[in-house]
Amino acid sequence: MSLKKTFGYLINKDSYQLIDSGERTKLEQIGPYRIIRPAPEACYPKSIPELWGKDIDAIYVRSDEGGGHWEYQNLIPQQFPVSIGNFKAYAKLTGFGHIGFFPEHLQLWNLLLNLNIKNLNPIQVLNLFAYTGLSTVACVKRGFEVCHVDSAKGMVELAKMNMALNNLDDHSARWIVDDVKKFVGRERRRGREYKGFILDPPSFGRGLKNEVWKLEQHISMLFEDLMNMCNYSPLFVFFTCYSSGFTPIILERFLRTYIKKDGLFLSGELSIQEISGYLYSSGGMFGIYLSKEILPSEASILENLIMKKIIGDKD
């Protein structure tokens, strides 16, 4: 059976969809616009090449000197709303080749939405390197009290807009524009307590006052501070990153080293399903800890993180 007969190439022009990947690129539908971006991991042939030449609106081209630029075939607004799963977000094509959110995090947002918080007191969550805040949206939807921290003021403002787009009051979260290391250190000294932690640290970054962040150098100290704020007994931790060398095994070992409480540990690759049925690996990794009392009641929510989807015969 052909891929076309199996999946029908159903493309929704109101939402985000990964159409296909291959030959070190990926083809995406972002609302009404179709774009092509680099995908170094996609070193295999394209699955549905007949869709690649149709109505492309923008292509991101990397420079040999680093960075890159967008080549626009048609006008695209500076930012525009799209749906992804049960969430809404403002898409924004950035000079770094990003689109304003990381679609491969969708399963993590869904997991946050399905955590079991019955009979638990209000849960304080710290979302670090929080970017445009769809993890914050998921947490607020679930009833958590969130502190959203990012050093980029523009990203925090876009996160507030994403809250409104999802019909949530932006006063439902605490918004902090600050260097993550400095803020966490102050919170620990103040004796603030948090029970949930989400962090998606870069390999390298600079804070508001040129503070340097290096993942391999600073992540251990950061984890020590975080676990100190929950007596090494969190309800959940979501740790994601895109740094070479930080494999799922390493992320899970970090969690097992610092968390002194029984629970479920998961690790793997951040991926998203293409309309062809294949899973696309984004190059990112996740490590997740869930305390026993917060495990979702539906096993399928967890299974989706670790199960491999199989598609039929492609001839």
Image (cartoon, rainbow, N blue to C red):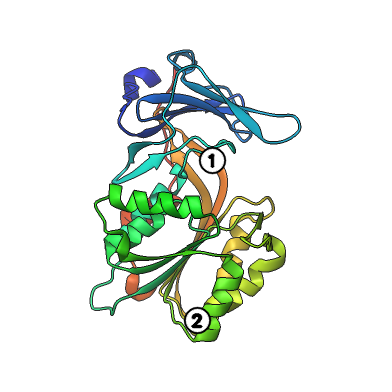
Q: Quadrant of the N terminus?
A: top left
Which badge, 2 or 1, is on the more N-terminal residue?
2
- Between 202 and 292, the one lying in front of the other is 202
- Between 195 and 212, the one lying in front of the other is 212
For residue 86, above or below residue 141: above
**Position of residue 167 in the picture relative to residue 53 (left or right):** left
Q: Is residue 41 visible?
A: yes
- Between 305 and 70, the one lying in front of the other is 70
Counting the numbered discs, the total is: 2
Task: Tell me the element at label 2.
Answer: loop
Question: Where residue 241 appears, x then y in whole percent?
Answer: 58, 54
**Position of residue 103 in the picture relative to residue 121 (left or right):** right
Q: Is residue 108 visible?
A: no
Question: Where residue 152 appears, x then y in whole percent?
Answer: 54, 54
Q: Tell me the crowding category of disc 2: few under 14, some 14 to 19, or many 20 or more residues within 10 angstroms, Cα based.
A: many
For residue 304, above or below residue 294: above
The residue under label 1 is which amino acid type? Ser
- Between 170 and 228, the one lying in front of the other is 170
The residue pinned by badge 1 equals: 281
Question: Where residue 207 appears, x then y in whole percent?
Answer: 63, 60
User: Which residue appears at 53% of the width and 40% of the height?
Assistant: 281
Question: Where residue 208 appears, x then y in whole percent?
Answer: 61, 60
- Front position among marks 2 and 1: 2
The residue under label 2 is which amino acid type? Met
Alpha carbon separation for disc pair 2 and 1 = 33 Å
Q: Quadrant of the C terminus?
A: top left
User: Which residue appears at 44% of the width and 42% of the height?
Assistant: 103
The residue pinned by badge 2 equals: 229
Q: Are marks 2 and 1 in contact (CB under 8 Å)?
A: no
* Residue 63 badge: none
Task: Tell me the element at label 1.
Answer: strand
Q: Tell me the crowding category of disc 1: few under 14, some 14 to 19, or many 20 or more residues within 10 angstroms, Cα based.
A: some
